[in-house]
């Protein structure tokens, strides 16, 4: 620092006034230079900075940031080269005075101040009483988000009432921020989940909750989220995420069992896809120990089948009180004998392995005789299986079965592993203690899955692997590096894209007019007949298994072989590559230690060691000459996304960079994003709660979740890096931020003057007033470059000279062009989609500086106007 300047110093108020003048005139380069020189001339930079910030205006119309945010950003950069500017060397009294002034600047009106002020003035070192006082002030001022963020950054969670901080966040549909608040404290996590569960009751009163926070106003969308059906989903998700005991969340568990009960009734009496025995088994497990569920069972029986006798039998079985019975059930109970009121066990006739002719005509049949289907329960039988399966070059169909866990939280344990090779099927009984608890069985499966010389076929194998790890926890000790696996789900997705003529990945959908889905649909499409899935929801833990269960288990594994062999004979006939294995690569099962490290990647659907999903087919996987995969880069225009209504700021940033973005309106339901993603081949960008629901509605990797506490600019950088977008200066403003159109019409000053005159928007005093006209922000490349965005250029004939409308119907928005602008700007860019007019200004340079870390220097020629 210059000693002379230090002794004299520049007045902070005068410096702020100079900066405000440059800011108002949008002279960005001069503004930066004056800020840097001004900081060096301040006698007391830390004190002067606060003086300037205290007098800075808030957000101005037409500006995306504030002068205060700009000053803080430039001060942080300047401070890197002036490390002595720090509160460390100050006396305690002076340091405290500055810290308290800085703390008072953290409000909702200046959202960008918190992080820089915490860093510059080391606010985390303040006594907790000062920080807690500020948090309380923010709460009283309805700055709930800022109160939560300050509490987290200063690590005050243990000093605060969790409900006081988190309840307003939840009511305002900011549950992800509440989850971040309790992230590192198991006790707070339990309290948050129990709080949500306490709201999972029909009588929940949102207005009563809001009365605790006067002045808190909820939109209809926010109020709709405080419903038991939504909250119970979050409770289950958080129970799994935070490992919470389900017994602490009885409301949500009860709600889930109610839903399961209705589902079982639908499967049995409407869809008729569940056998009587399977239905009874699941019903009894679901309603056991709950009078409310038992009453609901009787009510649903009357509703679905109308058979009062059946309802009376179950009412008698569970001793349902008379005053809880539907009309007619009590009278029916009185008219039946004790024997007639018994719910008799289903008597299954002796089944034949060979199915009836009608079944053979309708469904895919196992082409293997009964004697070649081996049910393994001992180590001796397992060794015979090893000799057959563990052969280099062998192709093995792999499937697993477990009991459906209606209303449960934890992952179900595998009851049966099916391994199919040509001509034989092996069924490993993991309910057999001698087999499931022996290390040789674990070693056998681990050897099979990690041998790259044995091709393993499956369909949607991620769920199988999760249940397998839950069954054998020893697999968690180290990564199970699965090799030589081909998940036919990915093959099916590509086959569906080809048949539908789409270029982007889609979820596996049901064909029009077909009731089949998933693997059954794939078998139908490739082999001609679907699978009989009636035993899918069987009780796979009951022994002995019925013949129909054994047959179903064998079919589910063997059909994988038949599908693979059929597709391999002529892949081109199905629109597939010659090497089916190139469609997807093996997925490692992560250990618990690595799950935390890779949590971000798992949340976005991207697997370790794999290229990003969501690109066009010819971009998904490119292989070097040595066979090593690499992730290709794409241009911004090749990335097509739909932003959830919580990420509209991100959407505007991405459009600014040339990305094809559709944005949901505030009133749109989240499912609209899934519909757009499926129909237009887009990737969903969302945050927090909707992620789990949206992810399940699209193909793997087609939904990316972002941190809602990050700024939109940082979210945009994350998206660009995640999808390996090659951003160049020519991509900036290559797409209209208002309507997402990427076609512009260039108009000269003369033509623009004529159009303004024709509409009567030019006046005689325009010339004299031009110097006083504030010029709105626009585009301008630095260093005198010619602005030439990488967009499509419309011919002059696309504009009707009489109506000033484009062929698509958009009229030029001439009223947005200040008359004084004509004497400064020689060329204008008009969006043909909405008619918005753009011109060269300072906005271009600012965007360049914001995205410098991901901006690429490109040698390719930028296309110019034809």
Image (tube, rainbow, N blue to C red):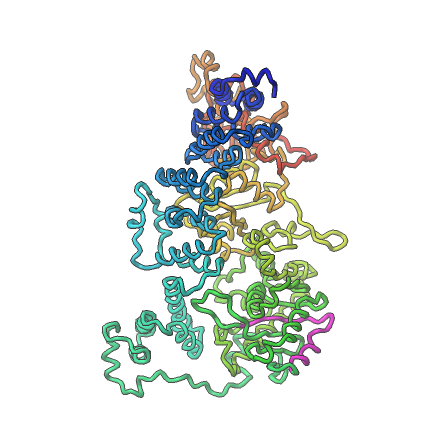
In-front residue for pair 272/192: 192
Asked whether the viewer can see residue 754, the reply is no
- Please provide the residue range marked out in magenta: 381-401
Furthest residue in direction right, as rendered: 626
Q: How many marks?
A: 0
Q: Is residue 390 magenta?
A: yes
Asked whether the viewer can see residue 342, the reply is yes
Image coordinates for residue 715, horizontal then vertical, percent? 53, 42
Image coordinates for residue 449, horizontal then vertical, percent? 66, 67
In the displayed structure, 3 sits above or below 162; it is: above
In-front residue for pair 527/163: 163
In the displayed structure, 670 sits above or below 536; it is: above
Image coordinates for residue 404, horizontal then vertical, percent? 48, 70
Left or right placement of residue 614 versus residue 407 in this view: right
Q: Is residue 72 magenta?
A: no
Left or right placement of residue 229 versus residue 557 in this view: left
The residue drawn where x is 29% and y is 87% is 338
The residue drawn where x is 48% and y is 42% is 154
- Locate residue 144: give its quadrant: top left
In the displayed structure, 229 sits above or below 107; it is: below
In-front residue for pair 428/507: 428
């Amino acid at each position: 620092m210059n000693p002379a300047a230090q002794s004299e110093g520049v007045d902070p108020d005068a410096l702020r006034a100079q900066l405000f003048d440059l800011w108002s005139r949008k002279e960005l380069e001069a503004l930066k230079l004056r800020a840097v020189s001004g900081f060096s001339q301040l006698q007391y930079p830390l004190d002067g900075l606060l003086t300037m910030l205290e007098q800075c205006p808030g957000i101005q119309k037409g500006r995306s940031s504030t002068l205060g945010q700009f000053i803080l950003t430039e001060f942080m950069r300047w401070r890197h080269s002036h490390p002595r500017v720090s509160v460390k060397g100050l006396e305690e009294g002076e340091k405290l005075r500055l810290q308290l002034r800085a703390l008072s600047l953290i409000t909702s009106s200046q959202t960008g101040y918190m992080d820089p002020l915490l860093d510059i003035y080391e606010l985390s070192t303040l006594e907790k009483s000062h920080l807690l006082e500020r948090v309380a002030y923010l709460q009283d001022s309805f700055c709930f988000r800022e109160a939560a963020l300050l509490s987290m950054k200063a690590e005050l969670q243990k000093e605060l009432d969790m409900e006081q901080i988190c309840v307003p966040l939840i009511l305002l549909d900011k549950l992800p921020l509440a989850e971040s608040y309790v992230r590192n404290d198991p006790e707070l996590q339990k309290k948050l989940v129990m709080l949500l569960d306490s709201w999972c009751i029909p009588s929940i009163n949102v207005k009563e909750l809001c009365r605790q926070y006067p002045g808190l106003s909820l939109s209809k969308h926010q109020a709709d989220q405080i419903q038991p059906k939504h909250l119970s989903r979050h409770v289950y998700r958080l129970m799994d995420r935070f490992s919470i005991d389900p017994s602490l969340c009885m409301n949500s568990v009860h709600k889930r069992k109610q839903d399961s009960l209705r589902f079982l009734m639908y499967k049995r009496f409407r869809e008729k896809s569940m056998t009587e025995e399977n239905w009874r088994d699941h019903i009894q497990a679901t309603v056991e120990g709950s009078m409310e569920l038992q009453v609901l069972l009787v009510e649903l029986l009357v509703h679905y089948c109308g058979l009062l006798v059946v309802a009376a039998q179950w009412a008698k079985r569970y001793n349902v009180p008379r005053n809880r019975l539907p009309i007619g059930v009590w009278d029916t109970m009185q008219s039946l004998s004790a024997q007639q009121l018994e719910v008799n066990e289903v008597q299954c006739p002796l089944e034949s392995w060979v199915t009836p002719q009608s079944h053979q005509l309708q469904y895919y049949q196992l082409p293997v005789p009964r004697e070649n289907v081996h049910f393994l329960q001992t180590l001796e039988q397992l060794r015979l299986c090893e000799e057959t399966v563990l052969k280099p070059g062998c192709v093995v169909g792999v499937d697993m079965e477990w009991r459906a866990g209606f209303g449960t939280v934890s992952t179900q344990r595998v009851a049966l592993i099916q391994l199919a090779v040509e001509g034989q099927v092996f069924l490993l009984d993991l309910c057999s203690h001698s087999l499931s608890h022996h290390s040789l069985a674990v070693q056998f499966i681990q050897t099979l899955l990690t041998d790259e010389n044995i091709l393993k076929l499956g369909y949607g194998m991620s769920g199988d692997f999760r249940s397998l790890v839950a069954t054998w926890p020893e697999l968690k000790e180290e990564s199970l590096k699965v090799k030589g696996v081909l998940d036919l789900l990915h093959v099916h997705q590509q086959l569906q894209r080809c048949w539908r003529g789409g270029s982007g990945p889609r979820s596996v959908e049901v064909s029009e007019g077909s009731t089949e889905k998933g693997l059954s649909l794939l078998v139908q499409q490739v082999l001609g007949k679907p699978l009989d899935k009636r035993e899918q929801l069987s009780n796979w833990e009951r022994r002995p298994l019925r013949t129909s269960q054994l047959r179903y288990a064998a079919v589910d594994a063997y059909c994988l072989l038949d599908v693979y062999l059929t597709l391999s004979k002529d892949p081109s006939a199905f629109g597939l590559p010659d090497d089916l294995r190139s469609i997807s690569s093996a997925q490692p099962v992560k250990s618990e230690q690595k799950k935390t490290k890779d949590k971000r990647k798992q949340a976005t659907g991207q697997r370790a060691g794999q290229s990003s999903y969501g690109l066009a087919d010819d971009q998904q996987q490119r292989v070097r000459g040595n066979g090593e995969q690499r992730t290709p880069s794409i241009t911004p225009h090749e990335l097509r996304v739909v932003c959830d209504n919580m990420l509209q700021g991100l959407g505007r940033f991405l459009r600014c960079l040339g990305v094809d973005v559709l944005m949901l309106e505030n009133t749109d339901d989240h499912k609209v994003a899934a519909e757009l993603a499926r129909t237009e081949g887009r990737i969903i960008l969302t945050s927090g709660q909707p992620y789990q629901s949206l992810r399940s509605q699209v193909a793997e990797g087609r939904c990316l979740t972002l941190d809602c506490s990050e700024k939109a600019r940082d979210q945009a950088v994350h998206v660009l890096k995640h999808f390996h977008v090659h951003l160049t200066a020519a991509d900036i403003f290559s797409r209209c931020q208002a309507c997402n159109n990427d076609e512009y019409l260039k108009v000269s000053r003369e033509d623009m003057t004529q159009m303004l005159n024709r509409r009567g928007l030019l006046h005689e005093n325009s010339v004299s007033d031009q110097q006083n006209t504030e010029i709105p922000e626009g585009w301008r490349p630095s260093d005198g470059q010619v602005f030439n965005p990488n967009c499509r250029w419309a011919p002059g004939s696309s504009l009707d000279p009489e109506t000033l409308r484009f062929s698509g119907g958009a009229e030029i928005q001439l009223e947005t062009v200040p008359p004084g602008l004509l004497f400064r700007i020689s060329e204008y860019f008009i969006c043909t989609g909405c008619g918005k007019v753009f011109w060269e200004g300072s906005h271009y340079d600012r965007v360049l500086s914001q995205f410098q870390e991901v901006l690429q220097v490109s040698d390719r020629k930028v296309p110019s106007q034809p």
